[in-house]
Amino acid sequence: MALYPLLRPLAFALDAERAHRATIAALKLLPAGPPAAPDPVLAVRVAGLDFPNPVGLAAGFDKDAEVFAQMLGFGFGSVEVGTLTPRPQPGNPRPRLFRLAEDRAVINRLGFNNRGQAAARHRLEARRRGGIVGVNIGANKENAGGDAAIADYAMGVRAMAGVAGYLTINISSPNTPGLRGLQDKGALEALLAAAMEARGTSGPLTPPIFLKIAPDLDHAAIDDIAAAALDAGIQGLIVANTTISRPALRSRHRDEAGGLSGAPLKPLALQCLRDVRRATGGALPLIAAGGIGSGADAYARIRAGASLVQLYSALVYEGPGLARRIARELKALLVRDGFARIADAIGQV
């Protein structure tokens, strides 16, 4: 981990997607360390799961469930693999992943490239260590709208429930045409009903289901999503995915199409979290994502109502030691402000 500042220029000499694949290949060669031990201040129970700390790895890094054990060994309290679709798909044409180094950001238009749920399920079944591994599921591109998409999500729930600590329904990627339409009230109600029914028929294991939403939602849409989520009985909302908006950016890649993540997403994601907290009235656990790169960022999301946080893009710039650093910084902030445990700080603006 201490070598990352020396290795980063080598990684940045490659285009972003090649560098990512090289990183995954290198991690696969490493032995997995033990998962993070529960910390008495940072440990938190969410949706019936005991997280040793609230710092999770967001979906998108380990798309095919290849290095989840290694990433848990770097101190993450949870790792979310995927997005995984029922059938393998290549994703969108390259180039489709761009670093915006001047902005500490990333733009991607990958399009759910993955080798399919069956291959990932095999690797998850073979895991030998503990730790919480969530599975993020999506619809294949040809089925991304309407009843066909709902069928894909139900299929994903049934396929992955037995190997997932939790399941995430991802309907918020901007890179699959028609997908975000599933956030509309009627479509979402049908989708969540199908997902919950599929979970009930997937076998003895019934992992909690989270819903991942976009940050580009108005108040009416957030209210509809909150109502649908509460009515369906899902166990949490992940707020939020990448944005199609473009704040002021400096990088030469600033006009690339796709979802923007990283530091520029921070204000939008934080405001979206506050809006969702208002809409749910604190009745649903929230997982914050988008622009989190420090303990202070994580603390702000927890004070705004999040029980857990997730990060990915900041790893590109900070390296694998970031999870432990954020956990240390977050603990120090909690202790400074007199909170004996993280649960006491949730929503305490």
Image: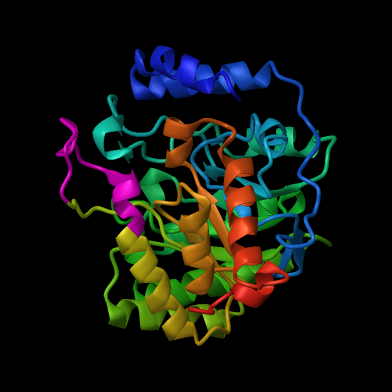
* Nearer the observer, 143 or 42: 42
Identify whether 320 is placed above or below 249.
above
Identify whether 217 is placed above or below 331.
below
Percent position (x, y) of residue 107?
Answer: 29, 39
- The residue at the point 65 percent across, 57 percent down is 331
Left or right: 238 as drawn, with respect to 339: left
* Nearer the observer, 95 or 85: 95
Percent position (x, y) of residue 41?
Answer: 74, 62
- The residue at the point 71 percent across, 51 percent down is 164
Is 233 covered by the magenta stretch?
no
Q: Quadrant of residue 168?
A: bottom right
Percent position (x, y) of residue 299?
Answer: 52, 62
- The residue at the point 31 percent across, 30 percent down is 99
What is the magenta range? Answer: 248-266
- The residue at the point 81 percent across, 48 percent down is 37
Left or right: 28 as drawn, with respect to 286: right
Left or right: 301 as drawn, with respect to 80: left
Identify whether 99 is placed above or below 179.
above
Is 253 covered by the magenta stretch?
yes
Residue 331, visible in the rendered structure: yes
* Nearer the observer, 161 or 310: 310
